[in-house]
Image (tube, rainbow, N blue to C red):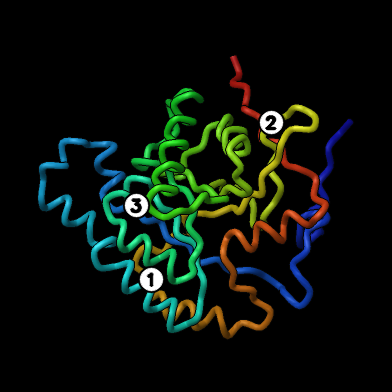
Amino acid sequence: MTETVDWRLPTPPGFRWPDGIRAAACFTFDVDAESPILFEYPETAAWLGVMSHQAYGARTGIARLLRVLDRRRIRATFFIPGYSAERWPAICRAIRDAGHEIAHHGYLHEGAHGAIPAVEEERLLRGLASLDEVLGVHPTGYRGPNWELTFETPAILARHGFVYDSGLMDADHPYVLATSAEPGAATLVELPGHWSLDDWDVALERLIERAQAIDGLWIATAAEIAAHVATLDLEPVVHRRPILPD
């Protein structure tokens, strides 16, 4: 059977936003703090300058973000490594108590590339345990540290009750992701991101103001968008590992 693509369609077949909605915006934040540096370069634990730099978000930046979100009455999604929750419990609880969604972002911000599935799963479970112990939260969403996923990651996520992933970069719209090519395989909702949407230093409050002024734009958490997509009758997308030529 030859696969065809109808490039004339503005949205994937079967996809639609809720009535009256033209697009969705989700404001998400990764609470990495010291974890990425400590995973890659554990010796930096003894370097005060580096640790101070990495602590800015947890010590200062998140509170500023929470004030902006509160002023604009926006609920956001915060992807938190388990280690960050352990090291900075008070500000992570403040995120939770302000009504924002808590999602999973590894334990020590470990990238998945080069890790066998058993190691991936161990890291995932350690992060889950930390978020549960510190925050009393069992997240339904995941974003891979460094945006790294393997072809085994989706199945691991589904096995542990995750509803959505937000780390792939191959689409403009959310879609249903098959966890394998096997018929009847479990699925997740994929909320694609992209480097071009990773603002780092953009003036956030002005961006939110502009978004709120757009007619028909739904500003929601990742979990809210994933819940909508799960109600649609979408054909799951199967990601197949490429076969390298000889």
| Mark 3 and mark 2 residues within 8 Å of each other at the beta carbon | no
Q: Nearer the viewer, mark 3 or mark 1?
A: 3
Q: Does residue 241 appear to the left or right of 76 in the view shown?
A: right
Q: Secondary structure at mark 2?
A: loop
Relative to 40, does residue 34 appear above or below in the rendering?
Answer: below
User: Identity of the amino acid at label 3?
Assistant: Ala
User: Identity of the amino acid at label 2?
Assistant: Ser
Give the residue at mark 2. 180
Give the residue at mark 1. 202
Q: Secondary structure at mark 1?
A: loop
Q: Nearer the viewer, mark 3 or mark 2?
A: 3
Relative to 53, does residue 72 appear above or below in the rendering?
Answer: below
Horizontal and vertical percent position of residue 233: 83, 52
Mark number, residue 85? 3
Q: Does residue 156 appear to the left or right of 195 in the view shown?
A: right
Distance, label 3 to label 1, CA atoms, is 25 Å
Kindly identify the residue that appears in the image at 76 percent across and 70 percent down: 18
Kindly identify the residue that appears in the image at 16 percent across and 41 percent down: 44
Mark number, residue 52? none
Residue nearer the viewer, 236 or 121 = 121
Horizontal and vertical percent position of residue 46: 11, 42
Kindly identify the residue that appears in the image at 47 percent across and 23 percent down: 116
